[in-house]
Image: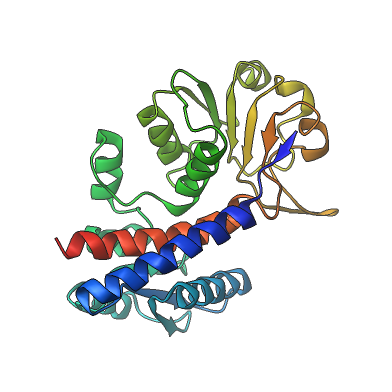
Amino acid sequence: MILIDGKKAAAELRAELKQEVTELREKHNKVPGLTVILIGDLTPSQIYVRNKEKSANEVGLKSEVIKYPESVEEKTVLDKIKELNSDETVSGILVQLPLPKHINKQKVIETIDPSKDVDGFHPMNVGNLSSGYESSVPCTPLGCYLLIKKFEPNLNGKKAVVVGRSNLNGKPMTQLLLKENCTVTITHSKTKDLKAECLEADIIVAAVGIPELVRGDWVKKDAIVIDVGINKTDKGIVGDVHFDEVSKNAKAITPVPGGVGPMTIACLLKNTIDCFKRSQI
């Protein structure tokens, strides 16, 4: 069994991106800029944003965090997004989720200029991805995809099972695997015989938010297992995959933590740079 080291892969990707930013600075005399809007004081959101800022600075991006109190009016946030849309120094805009209840998430997402939508959540990017056109891809599935490709460059004809159908992970993951000529089954917590579906898979991507749902006897020998889950339990943070059991069968598996997580932030930087490059054409 091979442990797919997300930290190492993310460090390698950041090193490539740092080099790319240096080249872009020489060519265009400016660097990509990432602006993050953080509303309220949720600890996980603050940690995520801090990590994003640190990584952005590490690769040489121009990084800015705009903080609002939880009580901020929706109009204030939407006006700020519109201002950033027309700011040429800003290549990527990210509004950290979750949002306070009085702010409409869909309205926020749709206000971001699709060409600066580094989260890949705007309906135009979602549509472009599913149509096979150029688009920003949500960072977590993009990270999963790059980890799979690093380990298995040729996915032609592979059978993939995606556990979870969220807009954030399951659906975009399915599109990325289809693009690689995989045969993809998208499953979820209501699927009748989930175990039988998983046993067919060469690749399993678990992103359903149920602690240790995927068991050892659900996975065939030589499967690649990508665990997107981050669940707090009595025994600490665990994924959606029962790591100890599944690692006995799988050909390769991502740990939790240290698997998909680091790649998500590295892919945010990649998306910011890609948005910048498209804006220069």
Total numbered labels:
0
Which residue extends farthest right? 235
Which residue is at a point 21% across and 59% down the rendered structure image? 278
Question: Measured along the vertical axis of the image, is residue 109 above or below residue 87?
Answer: above
Which residue extends farthest left? 281
Q: How is the image coloured?
A: rainbow
Question: Measured along the vertical axis of the image, is residue 4 above or below residue 136?
Answer: above
Which residue is at a point 49% across and 64% down the rendered structure image? 15
Left or right of 9, for residue 110: left
Residue 198 percent coordinates (x, y): 63, 22
Residue 3 percent coordinates (x, y): 71, 42
In which image quadrant can residue 46 be found? bottom right
Q: Quadrant of the N terminus?
A: top right
Front residue of this view, candidates 155 and 144? 155
Which residue is at a point 55% across and 70% down the rendered structure image? 45
Question: Measured along the vertical axis of the image, is residue 89 above or below residue 140?
Answer: below
Q: Quadrant of the C terminus?
A: bottom left
Residue 14 percent coordinates (x, y): 49, 63
Residue 262 percent coordinates (x, y): 58, 58
Which residue is at a point 48% across and 38% down the rendered structure image? 170
Q: Can residue 112 be seen here?
A: no
Front residue of this view, candidates 98 and 159? 159
Q: Can residue 18 be seen here?
A: yes
In which image quadrant can residue 93 be found? bottom left
Left or right of 275, for residue 220: right
Question: Measured along the vertical axis of the image, is residue 216 above or below residue 66?
Answer: above
